[in-house]
Image (cartoon, grey):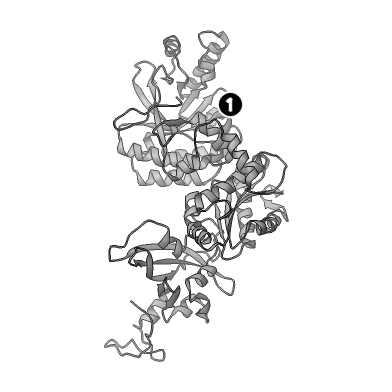
């Protein structure tokens, strides 16, 4: 397995294993070089990397001294280009039973001439007596089909929050042990809603991509950059103290704000706001460190037009404690990381037969004591903090898995406007549906009416993309946003869910009765099925059925419940 000392000349019966001066057509070095591959050994104890003899040819470097150790190699890896070899070996949980543990990574190497080269790195690592990675043998392959300059930070894994945590966890742990510093930034484009309204969602996506590129242009090679949750960028600055971080933040904000971003609709000025936290001062592990930076950004966003930068400190910690005093001990991000996000199913019944037609999946968080916290307790915080796309993506995973296991059932899920505006959730949905044949036709995606009319053209494009995946579409809280007949006729909608605010007063309000009947007639004219929300009594249910409503939803027809083995969970919020 070792590559060291492999310099003696040999002759093959096939005529091709000569020395450097006698390289035949079957010389492994020539073949490896022709296909862009080089093997290596990495002794993790000494941090020495021994490369194959063709390394200089494959990697395009005459001096391999800059890649002769794991630490030196890490400095050549382009920030945000993908999980590295180190991440692949130390990130996933695995144990070596004697034959090693396989790993795979794809990332970019920045060459001395400035060119970015994408590589695929595969191999196996072997453990020491205590089960820790001690030695790795692998091969680096040049991806010649990849563009030389892919968009910085747009790796599918690093785009996600959990991927970023995995990527920085070893550095944070090392900083804690060695009393060095790692600072994490969480940045966001300020007032993105205004940008969406002025230039449209597609152009706003281009603005976000340009911001990401500008951030990458001023980051050090050893630092890490990731985009996650739509309009959020996470950065890890190695060997950077909290005091030094403000200087770095000014440099990054300056790069982003130095010139307007050119879009198809014209130039657009942008402003960046950055929350920061440093290890080990503010946290000693990656999840908490990122959370502290998110809290710092959240504090900034509470003050429109306020400061652009805030470092987590004791004052902010006190503010967070005050804001959560008297509420359940709830940490949505920790719940996501711990996979304690679950869903309750509430039946939506046929108005005539009262038999369940499908169920709505409602997000819940399971506390340590087994109690469940409902959406009413968490969604406000989740939406204000900008992490709702993470929750929505988790719900896609949960519900598609459940539908795959229950082929006779149908579910509906809600997606927030913030999530719908970005591409990540739609890509995640497509991936899960592609992996689970037969699920798409039994999944209903709900968007609110107000979200649907925020940008009609962009909404139509996203709805068409969803329909192309094979799912059904519902407009939730219908009646609150005053969607026009033209909008309904042009949207590929299957179901209208009438806002429960109009349903709950039907027995007392003639105006509500007129309005709801009008909505039902409009939907029937367009061939769209209807659901009445918040049905709480039999009188209302009978009235709605008489008007021709298709489905009923509310506690009168069935309360939300979480599937559980054994004891029925205690529901905190219906």
Count of residue discs = 1
Q: Residue at horizontal 41%, vertical 73%?
A: 43
Quarter of the view holding residue 351: top left
Percent across and percent down for residue 276 are: 62, 51
Relative height, residue 153 to residue 357 (above, below): below
Check the image and report above or below for 295 versus 73.
above
Residue 3 in percent (x, y) is at: 37, 80
Report whether residue 159 is seen. Answer: no
Report the quarter where the C terminus lies: top left
The quadrant holding residue 19 is bottom left
Q: Is residue 22 above or below residue 399?
A: below
Camera-side residue: 79 or 376? Answer: 376
The quarter in which the N terminus is drawn is: bottom left
Report which residue position mark 1 lands on. Answer: 483
Q: Position of residue 369 (x, y in %)?
A: 40, 34
Q: Secondary structure at mark 1?
A: loop
As drawn, is 164 to the left or to the right of 397? right
Residue in the foreground of this view, choosing between 157 and 290: 290
- For mark 1, does the 10 Å Cα neighbourhood hold few (<14), some (14 to 19), or many (20 or more) residues? some
Q: Position of residue 424 (x, y in %)?
A: 50, 47
The answer to whether one can see residue 80 in this image is yes
Which residue sits at x=64%, y=42%? 299
């Amino acid at each position: 397995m070792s590559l060291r000392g492999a310099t003696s000349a040999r002759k093959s019966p096939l005529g091709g294993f000569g020395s450097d001066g006698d390289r035949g057509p079957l010389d492994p070095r020539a073949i490896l070089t022709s296909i862009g591959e080089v093997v290596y050994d990495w002794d993790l104890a000494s941090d020495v990397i021994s490369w194959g003899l063709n390394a200089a040819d494959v990697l395009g470097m005459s001096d391999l001294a800059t890649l002769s150790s794991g630490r030196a190699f890490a400095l050549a890896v382009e920030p945000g280009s993908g999980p590295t070899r180190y991440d692949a070996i130390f990130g996933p949980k695995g144990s070596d039973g004697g034959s090693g543990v396989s790993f795979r990574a794809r990332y970019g190497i920045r060459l001395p001439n400035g060119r970015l080269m994408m590589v695929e790195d595969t191999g196996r690592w072997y453990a020491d007596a205590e089960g820790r990675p001690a030695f790795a043998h692998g091969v680096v392959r040049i991806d010649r089909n990849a563009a030389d300059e892919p968009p910085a930070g747009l790796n599918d894994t690093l785009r996600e929050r959990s991927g970023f945590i995995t990527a920085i966890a070893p550095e944070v742990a090392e900083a804690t042990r060695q009393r060095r510093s790692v600072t994490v930034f969480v940045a966001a484009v300020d007032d993105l809603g205004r940008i969406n309204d002025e230039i449209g969602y597609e152009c706003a996506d281009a603005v976000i991509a340009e911001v990401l590129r500008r951030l990458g242009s001023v980051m050090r090679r050893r630092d890490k950059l990731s985009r996650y949750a739509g309009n959020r960028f996470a950065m890890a600055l190695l060997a950077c103290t909290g005091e030094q971080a403000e200087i770095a933040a000014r440099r990054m904000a300056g790069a982003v704000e130095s010139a307007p971003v050119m879009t198809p609709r014209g130039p657009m000025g942008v402003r960046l706001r950055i929350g920061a936290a440093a290890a080990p001062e503010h946290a000693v592990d990656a999840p908490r460190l990122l959370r502290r930076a998110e809290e710092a950004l959240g504090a900034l966003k509470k003050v429109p037009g306020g400061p652009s930068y805030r470092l987590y400190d004791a004052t902010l910690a006190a503010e967070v404690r005050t804001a959560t005093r008297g509420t359940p001990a709830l940490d949505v991000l920790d719940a996501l990381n711990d996979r304690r996000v679950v869903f309750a199913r509430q039946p939506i019944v046929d108005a005539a037969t009262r038999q369940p037609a499908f169920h709505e999946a409602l997000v819940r968080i399971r506390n340590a004591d087994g109690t469940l916290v409902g959406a009413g307790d968490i969604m406000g915080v989740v939406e204000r903090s900008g992490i709702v796309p993470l929750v929505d993506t988790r719900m896609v995973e949960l519900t598609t898995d459940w539908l795959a296991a229950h082929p006779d059932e149908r579910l509906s899920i809600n997606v927030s406007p913030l999530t719908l505006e970005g591409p990540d959730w739609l890509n995640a949905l497509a991936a899960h549906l592609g992996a689970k044949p037969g699920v798409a036709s039994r999944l209903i995606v709900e968007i609110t009416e107000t979200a649907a009319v925020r940008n009609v053209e962009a909404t139509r494009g996203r709805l068409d993309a969803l329909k192309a995946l094979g799912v059904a579409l519902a407009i939730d809280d219908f009646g609150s946003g005053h969607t026009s007949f033209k909008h309904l006729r042009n949207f590929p909608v299957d179901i209208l869910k009438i806002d429960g605010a109009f349903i709950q007063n039907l027995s007392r309000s003639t105006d509500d009765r007129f309005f709801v009947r009008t909505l039902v007639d409009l939907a029937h004219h367009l061939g769209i099925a209807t659901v009445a929300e918040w049905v709480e009594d039999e009188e209302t249910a009978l009235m709605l059925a008489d008007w021709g409503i298709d489905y009923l939803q509310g506690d009168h027809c069935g309360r939300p419940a979480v599937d559980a083995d054994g004891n029925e969970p205690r529901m905190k919020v219906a």
